[in-house]
């Protein structure tokens, strides 16, 4: 389960990178980078989804 914690925070790192990419494209060209925003939102969603699933899995293993 140690790897799941690493990948859990990797989602946040990718979200930060995609947000940075969207901001730099907006500042440079004035265009909104919808794919970067979509991928950042997906990465944040995956972070919370995987965290909830991991906690549920850990609680199930501890109760048995």
Image: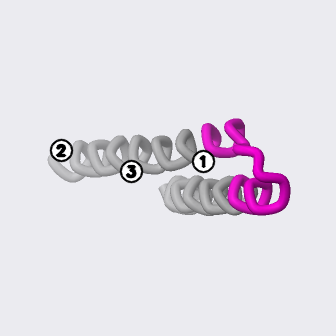
Q: Secondary structure at mark 3?
A: helix
Between 24 and 6, the one nearer to me in the picture = 24
Query: Mark 3: few, some, or many residues within 10 Å (few <14, many ≥20)?
Result: some
- Mark 2 lies on a secondary structure that is loop
Q: Nearer the viewer, residue 52 or 21?
A: 21
At a point 54% along the width and 61% down the height, the residue shown is: 9
**Mark 1 / mark 3, whichever is N-terminal:** 1
Residue under label 3: 51
Query: What label sits on residue 40 in the rendered view?
Result: 1
Which residue is at 37% across, 48% downward? 54
Question: Alpha-carbon neighbours of circle 1 within 10 Å: few (<14), some, or many (≥20)?
Answer: many
Q: Earlier in the sequence, mark 2 or mark 3?
A: 3
> Can you give x and y, in whole percent of width and height, for residue 28 in the image?
83, 60
Mark 1 element type: helix
How much space separates mark 2 and mark 1, taking CA atoms?
Answer: 37 Å
Q: Earlier in the sequence, mark 2 or mark 1?
A: 1
> In front of the other: label 1 or label 3?
1
Quick check: marks 1 and 3 in contact, CB under 8 Å? no
The residue range painted magenta reads 22-39
Return the residue at label 2: 64
**Residue 18: x and y, percent?**
69, 53
């Amino acid at each position: 389960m140690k790897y799941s914690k690493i990948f859990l925070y990797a989602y946040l790192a990718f979200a930060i990178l995609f947000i940075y990419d969207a901001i730099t494209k907006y500042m440079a060209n004035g265009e909104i980078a919808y794919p970067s925003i979509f991928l950042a939102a997906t990465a944040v969603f995956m972070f919370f989804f995987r965290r909830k699933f991991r906690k549920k899995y850990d609680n199930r293993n501890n109760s048995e």
